[in-house]
Every structure is written in C-alpha cells, then in structure tokens.
Amino acid sequence: MPAPSSGPAATAPRLQRALGLWDLVFYGIVLIQPTAPMPLFGVVDQEARGHVVTAILIAMAAMLLTAMSYGRMARAYPSSGSAYTYVGRELHPALGYITGWSMAMDYMLNPIICVIWCSKAAGNIAPAVPYAAWAVMFALLFTGLNLRGIRASAHTNEAIAIGLGAVVAVFLVAAARYVFGGPAHGAAFFMRPFYDPRTFSAPRLFTGASIAVLTYIGFDGISTLSEEVRDPRRNIPRATVLVCLITGVLAAVEVYAAQLVWPAGKAFPDVDTAFSWVAGQAGGAMLFQLVNFALLAANVGSGMGAQLGVARLLYGMGREDALPRRFFGVLDPKRSIPRNNVLFTGALALLGAFALSYQLGAEMLNFGAFIAFMGVNTAAFLRARRDGERRWTSMAAPIGGLVICFYIWLNLRWPAKLAGTAWLVAGVLYGAWKTRGFRKTVTFDV
C-alpha cells in the first residue's frame, strides 16, 4: 500500500462537505428570519387594500418557481451561487453585468431601509426623540460596529431566529385569544383577509405582491454554501424550495392573524411599524413593546449585516477594478475590513434615510431583485433546453417563474420603476465606458 501523500495538496485546508438538507433549511430560515413579513405589513395592507395574505401567497408562488430555477442552476454551477454568474454564463456576459448591477442596488438599499425602519420603531419607544436623531444614531451604530469588525456568529444568528420565533408564537396566541374571546364571527369574517369584495382590486393586489416579495429576499443565499453541502446537486434545490415554502406558510399565518385583529380600512398610527400596533391591539402595551423591540433588534442585525455585505461587494468590485481600486479596493491593515467602503455605505444609508420612504426603498430593492429573478428563470429555461429536458415539467417552472415575476415587476409603482430604470441606465453607461463597449468583462463579487 503506498504511503499517504504529505505534500501541499494533502495538507491544504479545504471546505468540508458536512451540511445536510435540514442544515440548509434551518440556515435559510435564519437568513430570512421568522418575522420577515412583519415590517412590511402596513405598506402591503395599504397597497393591496387589506389583501396581505393573498399578496404573500402570490409572491410565494413566484418565489417557489424561481427557487426551482435557482436549484437547476446550482446543479449546473455547483461552485457558484450568484445570479450574475448564472445569467452571464447562460445568456451573455453583458446581461450578467446588468444583473450584477441590479443586485448591487439591492445590497445598497438594504441598510437604508433598515435605518428607516429602526428609526421608526425606536420612535415608538421614545416618541420625544425626533426621527432625524434616530436615523443619525442608527447609521452611526451600524457603521461604528462594522468598523470595529464586530459580526454575529452563526450560533448568535440561530439564537436570534429562535427568539423571534418565540415572539411570533406569543403574538399568534394573543391574536387567537383576541379574535375568539370577543363576539362570534361568521365564515365571511375569516375569509375576508383572502378576498374582500368591498375593497378588492387586482392591480392593487399585484402592487402589494410586488412589495410582499421582500418577505422572501435572501432565500437564494442557500446556494452560496454549495461547496460545504453533502450531495449539493440534490440538497441545494430541495432546501431552496423548502425554505420558500416554509417562509411563505409562516408569513401567511402571521399576516392572516394580524388582519383578523386589525380589519382592512382601519388606519394605522404609523404604516411602517403597523405590525407593532396590531400586536398592541391583540395583547396590550406589553405585547406592543415586545414585538416592537423584537423587530427593532432583528432589523439592527439585518442592517449591520447588510452594510458589511455592501462594503464587501464594493471591495470585490474595486479589487477587480470595476470601481476605482484606490478607494474601493483597499482593506484596513489592522482589522482586514474594507474601511473606506463601510464609511461610504454608512453615509449612503444616512442620506437614504432622509431621501427615501421605507416603501419606496423596499420597492426599489425589489425592482433589482426581480431583474435577477427573471434572469435566473430565463437562464434555467435555456439550461433545460441545452440539457435536452424538453418535457413540460422541466419547462413549466422557469417559464411560470418568469411570467409571474415579470407581471409582478410591472405592477411596481412608477416611482420605483423610474428610479430603478435610472440606476440601470447609469450602470449600462458606466459598464460600456469601463469595458469599451462591453468588449471586456466587469466582475461582480456577488
């Protein structure tokens, strides 16, 4: 028997394939968070005229089909989890660049809407402090902690997800007691969150669905673990679909209970933090503060992570000279973090907190997300054809995902479409200048 090799190849560290299906599912739920639909409840309720449950379910249909397309592409490219890569390789590098540019907008908007929501939620705790002061404080908090290199461990994120799950359970119990502890209700009352003929409007419903998609943002992060998963060609697609399904069912239950407690048409004291007010209606001041604080903590964690994600994205682009390398492509020598980018994104988050509303920021984020989703569905359709899988079962998911995503994207409000289109035009012009008419490739580290 030959002696085991002791060369560099034998001793070099490598990623271990240790994750199974349910490890991936739990990771995806932690990534999205059990309270995902709560921050956007009021905005969707306002746009969909009370049909939040139906909007969540329509968004789930689009995301389930898109998740299947992500799964197909993860099988084709098991070492990459990027929509930019999928579209660039299957369609055209220039289209991949546009997808990456759209995703960059998502990354940049995420910390902005977190600062906005945290500032509104903190205002519920201390209303005497003005919104502007809270916005400055949270922008500085995210930036300061990221400059120190502080990041939550996987175990901390799991603990946060479990804690948020407990808050969801407490809310559902309080909502059930509120609904069934009062006068008896007929069947129409319990069906109204799904369909209320007095307020139903199909265009408004799909506008609500275009915002409700934010509930599922992050599910595609599962595919980035491909190199650490046992049997990734099988487990990545299954986990991606399961996470979308579990998230959608849980979200539908949460907003259904909220709509029973707070019927459509009743104005919220603050639309952006509407779910906290629903919790107060169901369980009193204590539950109001519990839900408000839980969502505040969740958004602080999301905001910090999102800002660091943007900083790393910009560093990757700077390192590849897609952005000016001298500013974006450098690391702090002491803490090995992209300090310039953290400061830049902190300033961007602060400015955005005064320039945008939570709703417009969320819709612009989804504008970019839908560009990526439509691109992945198209790439999956072409991949199925190249692989010779011409059965309708292989074609239905990418075609259905593309059609539904496109229709929901069309129903975004015009300010979001106008701002998103301006971002795309700027990206195309910059990319054309940087690559001399796209004769070279611009790399996105996403």
Image (cartoon, helix red, strand yellow):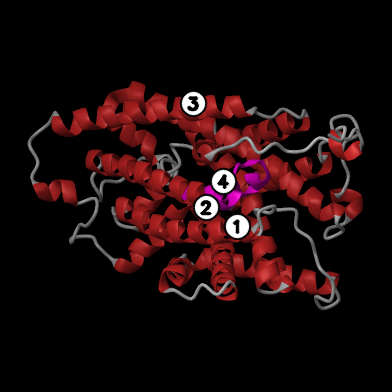
- Residue 446 appears left or right of 254: right
Label ID, residue 237:
2
Residue beneath disc 4:
113
Secondary structure, mark 3, is loop
- Marks 1 and 2: CB-CB under 8 Å? yes
Q: Name the side, left or right, on which 235 lies relative to 84.
A: left
Q: How far across and how far down the image is residue 365, in percent?
A: 56, 56
Mark 1 Cα-neighbour bin, 10 Å: few <14, some 14–19, many ≥20? many
Residue that sits furthest to the top in the current view: 286
Marks 4/2: CA distance? 30 Å
Q: Decide: marks 1, 3 in contact (CB < 8 A)?
A: no
State which mark lies toward you, 3 or 2.
2
Instruction: Judge whether 218 appears above or below 20 on screen.
Output: below
The residue under the point 80% across, 65% down is: 442
Task: Answer with the quarter of the image where residue 321 lies.
Answer: bottom right
Instruction: State the CA–CA distance, disc 4 to disc 3.
Output: 20 Å
Q: Position of residue 145 (x, y in %)?
A: 71, 29
**Of discs 4 and 1, which sits in the foreground?**
1
